[in-house]
Amino acid sequence: MKRLVVLSGAGMSADSGIRTFRDAGGLWEGHPVEQVATPEGFRQDPRRVLDFYNQRRRQLSEVAPNKGHLALAEMEQHYHTTIVTQNVDDLHERAGSSRVLHLHGELLKARSTGPNARVFPWSEDIVLGDTCPDGFQLRPHIVWFGEEVPMLQRAAEVTAQADVLIIVGTSMQVYPAAGLVHYKKEGVPLYFVDPDPQMAPGEHGNLEIIRERASVGLPILANRLRPGDSG
């Protein structure tokens, strides 16, 4: 079975009603990035940071996977499909995708601030006083600015194994995630689903651009990529 790898970003979830954290002014839901998405921000005001992510977590109960998520899940019937996502929601999993690698962490997990950094499933609010069994305060299991991306090497390995590569919902302009496309093997077809693509045909070889939102473009592309289609 051929290997399909999907690199997905915020635009993937936007079609389900999840707003991207960062707006055109660089603020995250009205907050400077330094306040809510850095280790320093957490040390300075942990309550504010916890509340910020508690709000994001609560929003997950109000949204559902869109047709793009469902199309990718259906592709597991035809390809060994792995999704490498920059998103911290669980919409890919709820759609039925079984191999999802979260580069930037997951809202539905909490992490100990202790030296072992143990990770726990967590669906409720995280508040001050919530601790791991070793007594250390819990924090969101989110990769903040200035922190290492622990899954990056695994993501690079997965991308290098792809027989087909899809990029959807991300400009691929922000590193380190943007560097993953360079691990694609020469000759592997690359599809970029985005209504306002920042890539140009020929930029990465074998690139085809589908100028649609994720919920529209992915079902179209999935239909083409089913085995037996000349695509």
Image (tube, rainbow, N blue to C red):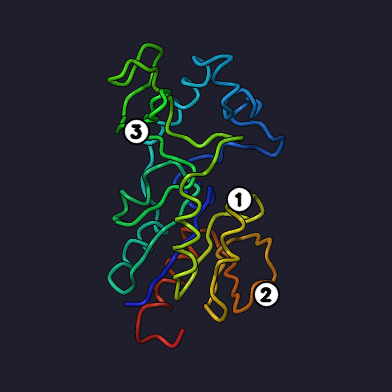
Mark 2: which secondary structure?
loop
Outermost residue, front side: 115
Q: Residue at x 41, y 70 (%)?
A: 4
Dividing the picture into quadrants, the one containing residue 5 is bottom left
The residue mark sitting in front, 2 or 1, is 1
Residue identifier under label 3: 119
The one of 219 and 176 positioned closer to us in this rendering = 176
Image coordinates of residue 139 in percent, x first then y, are 43, 24
Q: Amino acid at mark 1?
A: Pro
**Label disc, if present, on residue 201 of the rendered structure:** 2
Dividing the picture into quadrants, the one containing residue 169 is bottom right
**Label disc, if present, on residue 176 of the rendered structure:** 1
Q: Is residue 202 above or below residue 175?
A: below
- Kindly report the distance in space between the C-alpha atoms of the residues bearing marks 3 and 1: 23 Å
Label located before the other in sequence (2 or 1)? 1
Q: Residue at x 57, y 78 (%)?
A: 186
